[in-house]
Amino acid sequence: MKKCLILLLAALLFGACDEEDTPVTPEEYADRTVLVYIAAENNLTGYSQMRFADDDLREMKEGSKMLDDRQNLLVYVDKAENDPPYIARIQNGELVDSFALEECLSADPAVLEEMLLYSRMNYPARSYGLVLWGHSNGWVVLSDSVSYAGTRAYGGDTGNNMSDSAGKYWMNIPSMARAIGHAMGDDHLSFILADCCNFGCIESAYELRHVTDYLITSPAEIPELGAPYHLIVPPMFDTSETFYQSVVDAYFDYYMEEFANDPTYYFNSKYGDLEGYSIPFAAIKSSELENLALATADLLSTIPGKLSPAGDFNFDHLVYYDYDRRTSAEYGYDIYHSLKENTSESDFAKWEPWFRKAVPYSRFSAKWLSSMNQLIADMQVFSESTQDYGMVSMFFPRQIYDNAGQYSSYRILNLNTAIQAFEWNSVIRWQQYGW
């Protein structure tokens, strides 16, 4: 497996300094450095008309014109073309300080680690942010190996500079958390903005809680055009305590307007059916997640009979965000809606404040752009009340997921056991309910 060589980055880190250069002192640090990690060696870019990476780079250049010299916007770009991947700064609408890298797998956590280390060493700042650009399927992946392709978490790299698929190689979330932690050392990410589908699940957020202050993302599918970077770049550099609200609002409001203004492009079943809707989006606060995990475990302990394999946990009409084509079963249920519908009013009332602390800001949409026909059909019966949604998903074991191994076109993955490798499960402990 090829990856960007550490020796190459070492040369970039130190080779650009001449003998007269002096180290940057803390007083000279930038206010914030943000790395946009563009994993685009897949069907999001390439030789066809699917050139979403290029479109977003143009938007970033536009957004960079509103930054000052103490705000560093960096991009790592790996596209499905013969040009090598590169890392660069975008400043005043232009790519500067661009370095070509050896061919690598952007889905390799070692590459993510190296790009973050490069950013931190060359553009030291008082705070840091990371944008994950590419494909995602939430937490769902089997092992730490990027060669595993039966299902996916984040990345999507074909490994051959082709754009003929969503990708063969993927990065799972525990590996991502370790890579970020190694790269950042004593520094901490102020935020991770996941500009990819289905990343807003409680399992991923909990796994990343030690490496970022906030996870800003959607539990649902997002349009292929992704974030409106010309609007989102400036608020990503806001260092106020509630900066995440501007990021969420910019994303949500942009697609609310786009869905209404371009109904023949943005629709599910018929033209105009998404008018008045956008994309569910939320900011998750890491420092509150351990309290939320304990509160969730306590709440689940009030309904043990419902949670067993033979239990009667009610999944009918629950809001969900993903659909497993292998088993013809939905998963990634809205955590708030699922628990509200299946626990007592008094027990849920004890849990709700912990959720509100962990998810301090969100924007509600009962429908969104989807590629899954079953999910589109089910949206017609989803609740239209903002009081029923948390805009964060959670996995609940079901017997139907045990059937994943019978599908020969997929490697065996039993979601009911795969979830047990995640730190969220060390608190929830699905095994105690018979899974």
Image (spheres, helix red, strand yellow):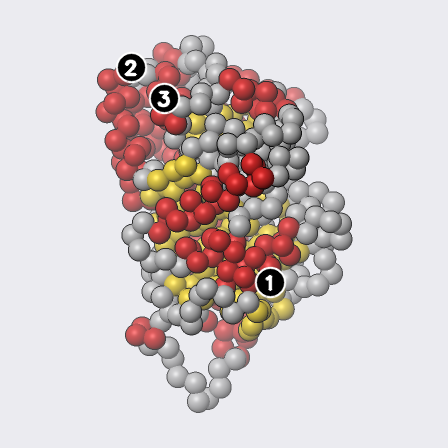
Q: Which residue is identified by label 3? A: 339
Point out residue 178 in the picture as x, y percentages from the top left corner: 44, 51
Q: Amino acid at mark 3?
A: Leu
Quarter of the picture holding the N terminus: bottom right
> In the figure, 231 relative to 303: above or below?
below
Q: Nearer the viewer, mark 1 or mark 2?
A: 2
Point out residue 180 in the picture as x, y percentages from the top left corner: 44, 54
Assign a secondary structure to mark 1.
loop
Assign a secondary structure to mark 3.
helix
Q: Amino acid at mark 2?
A: Ser
> In the figure, 327 relative to 18: above or below?
above
Q: Is residue 65 visible?
A: yes
Q: Residues within 10 Å of mark 3 (few under 14, many from 20)?
A: many
Q: Which residue is identified by label 2? A: 344
Looking at this view, is 229 or 165 the one in front? 229
Q: Which residue is identified by label 1? A: 4
Q: Residue furthest bottom?
A: 20
- At x 66% / y 42%, what residue is drawn? 166
Q: Marks 1 and 2: CB-CB under 8 Å?
A: no
Looking at this view, is 106 or 196 the one in front? 196
Q: Closer to the N terminus: mark 3 or mark 1?
A: 1
Q: Closer to the N terminus: mark 3 or mark 2?
A: 3
